[in-house]
Amino acid sequence: MSTANQREPTNDELWAQPPTIDIPVAGKGLAPLPHAPVPVPGAHQSHPAQDRTVFVLAIVSVALGIPLTAISSTTVGLPGLLVVWTGIVLVNFFYARSRRL
């Protein structure tokens, strides 16, 4: 049995705390803090949600295209296969085109 007094470390001891920053006051000769950058009108800004929706549509199209290919080619043949894939391509094309406008 140990006679040493041991204790669990606290969160402050385990994890480094962010440093405190002295915020300069504008009236005391210091420059004010800079604000967030203002977006430039007409500049291209990326929208990750748009890219994700196009990707999801592509995955769903392939997932639906596989069974539809099997069904259409066995029941109708080549014309059915062409109709299915033409429809899938057109849906993807017009969706992607509408997102760019």
Image (cartoon, rainbow, N blue to C red):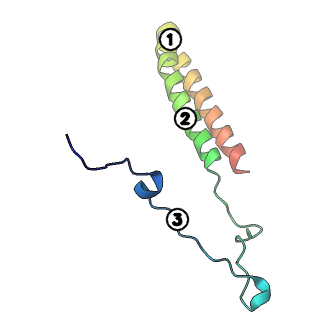
Q: Residue lying at the far left in this picture: please name it.
A: 1
**Viewer-nearest residue: 13 or 91:** 13
Element at badge 1?
helix
**Viewer-nearest residue: 19 or 73:** 19
Q: Residue lying at the far top in this picture: please name it.
A: 75
Work out whether mark 3 precedes mark 1 in sequence or the reverse, and give the earlier one.
3
What amino acid is found at the position of numbered circle 2 in the picture?
Ala
For image coordinates 77% across by 84% down, the residue present is: 26
- Packing grade of label 3 (10 A; few <14, some 14-19, many >=20) is few
Q: Residue 2's spot in the image, x, y percent?
A: 21, 44
For image coordinates 68% across by 63% down, the residue present is: 44
What amino acid is found at the position of numbered circle 1 in the picture?
Ile
Q: Which residue is mark 1?
A: 71
What amino acid is found at the position of numbered circle 3 in the picture?
Pro
Q: Residue lying at the far front in this picture: please name it.
A: 3
Work out whether mark 2 precedes mark 1 in sequence or the reverse, and give the earlier one.
2
For image coordinates 80% across by 87% down, the residue present is: 27
Q: Which residue is mark 3?
A: 18
Q: Residue 10's spot in the image, x, y percent?
A: 44, 51
Element at badge 3?
loop
Considering only vertical position in the picture, is 65 above or below 48? above
Tell me the quadrant of the picture where the N terminus can be found: top left
Considering only vertical position in the picture, is 57 above or below 31? above
Q: CA distance from mark 2 to mark 1?
A: 20 Å
Q: CA distance from mark 3 to mark 2?
A: 43 Å
Q: Residue 70's spot in the image, x, y percent?
A: 46, 14
Element at badge 2?
helix
Q: CA distance from mark 3 to mark 1?
A: 60 Å
Work out whether mark 3 precedes mark 2 in sequence or the reverse, and give the earlier one.
3
Image-based side of 43 in relation to 56, left or right: right
Q: Which residue is mark 2?
A: 58
